[in-house]
Structure formats: structure tokens, C-alpha cells
């Protein structure tokens, strides 16, 4: 399934789903155990200014990565760690992504997330969401699905 198909009404808003969060977090721990890495931070919840869950991990080779989860889309992604005030994520492929897929979650590749955003990608969003897009002007599909909108 293409990541663009996850662009449905509600995916740009902070969405709290305790069951999906728990499923994602278990998969994150399983992913790190399977690959020799470790979860290094507590989970940060979606809030104004971030529509996704976030947790930090360290891979076996010492590389730090942020695991992201958009609960409304059941979509997992990964990005390089960044300054908290930076809006643009540097997407990377999800390490040991099969753990998330086996849990029934969708896994986005970096290549999918850096695709330019087109008007046709917005057709299923609500009018309020389209106004947010017009205001914030995300450039990439990933910037829409893992956003900083306030």
C-alpha cells in the first residue's frame, strides 16, 4: 500500500490512541531488541505543534534515530534526531521495520516521505486541514503526515 493512500481526513491533527500507541511502542522495543539497539527516551505524545508520537532509539552501531507514529494513519516513520525548534524532519528508513509491519502498522520509507506534495494528495482532507496546509505550506508528503501545524 502506498503511503499517499494514508492521506485521509484527520491525519494532520494530533490524534491520541492509547491502544495504537501501546502497539507501536511494543513494536519499537521488539524492533530494537531484534536489531541490537535500544529505546533511549520516553514517548512524547502528539500535541499542538506535532501531530505524532515520538521516541528516541540508538541503533547497534550507535546511530541515534527518532521513531515517529501517526496514530490516525497507523503509519510509522523514522527521522534523524533534530533540534526541537526545527520543523523539517530528515526522514530515514525505519530500522527493523518488519516488527512494525508484523504488528499491523504501515511503515513508510524515506523515499515515500520525501515525495513532493501535490494538490491531488489533499483531496480527502477536511476543509480545515486544507486551510492549515495552505497556511503552513508543507513541501513533502512526510511533512504533511508528520507535521508541526499549530
Image (cartoon, rainbow, N blue to C red):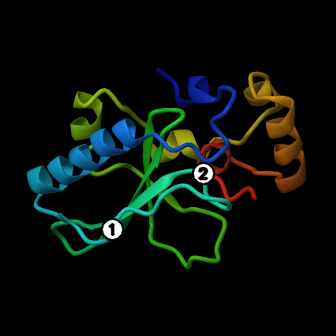
Q: x%, y% of residue 93?
A: 39, 50
Q: Quadrant of the C terminus?
A: bottom right
Q: Is residue 96 visible?
A: no
Q: Is residue 47 left or right of 120 when viewed as pictured?
A: left
Numbered disc 2: secondary structure: loop
> 31 or 19: nearer the eye?
19
The answer to the question of whether label 2 and label 1 lie on touching residues, with beta carbons closer than 8 A, is no
Figure check: 64 above or below 91: below
Figure check: 99 above or below 50: above
Name which quarter of the figure residue 74 lies in.
Answer: top left
| First of labels 2, 1 by sequence position | 1
What label sits on residue 51 in the rendered view?
2
Figure check: 109 above or below 2: below
Q: Is residue 74 visible?
A: yes
Count the labels in the image. 2
Q: Is residue 34 left or right of 100 when viewed as pictured?
A: left
Q: x%, y% of residue 67?
A: 38, 56
Q: x%, y% of residue 107?
A: 39, 37
Q: Is residue 83 left or right of 131 when viewed as pictured?
A: left
Name which quarter of the figure residue 63 lies in.
Answer: bottom left
At horizontal 10% and vertical 50% (from top left) the residue drawn is: 34
Alpha carbon of mark 2 to alpha carbon of mark 1: how far?
A: 17 Å
Q: Is residue 62 left or right of 107 when viewed as pictured?
A: left
What label sits on residue 86 in the rendered view?
none
At horizontal 22% and vertical 66% (from top left) the residue drawn is: 59
Numbered disc 1: secondary structure: loop
At horizontal 35% and vertical 49% (from top left) the residue drawn is: 94
Question: In the rendered image, which residue does mark 1 sit on?
Answer: 42
Q: x%, y% of residue 47?
A: 60, 58
Amino acid at each position: 500500500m502506498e503511503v499517499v493512500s494514508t492521506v485521509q481526513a484527520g491525519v494532520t491533527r494530533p490524534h491520541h490512541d492509547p491502544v495504537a500507541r501501546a502497539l507501536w511502542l511494543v513494536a519499537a522495543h521488539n524492533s530494537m531488541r531484534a536489531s541490537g539497539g535500544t529505546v533511549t527516551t520516553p514517548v512524547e505524545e502528539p500535541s499542538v505543534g506535532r501531530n505524532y508520537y515520538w521516541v528516541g532509539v540508538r541503533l547497534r552501531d550507535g546511530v541515534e534515530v527518532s521513531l515517529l507514529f501517526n496514530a490516525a494513519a497507523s503509519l510509522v516513520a523514522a527521522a534523524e534526531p533534530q533540534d526541537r525548534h526545527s520543523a523539517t524532519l530528515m526522514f530515514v528508513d525505519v530500522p527493523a521495520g518488519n516488527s512494525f509491519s508484523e504488528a499491523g502498522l504501515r511503515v513508510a520509507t524515506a523515499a515515500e516521505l520525501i515525495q513532493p506534495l501535490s494538490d491531488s494528495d489533499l483531496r480527502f482532507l477536511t476543509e480545515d486541514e486544507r486551510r492549515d496546509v495552505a497556511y503552513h505550506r508543507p513541501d513533502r508528503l512526510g511533512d504533511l503526515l508528520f507535521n508541526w501545524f499549530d
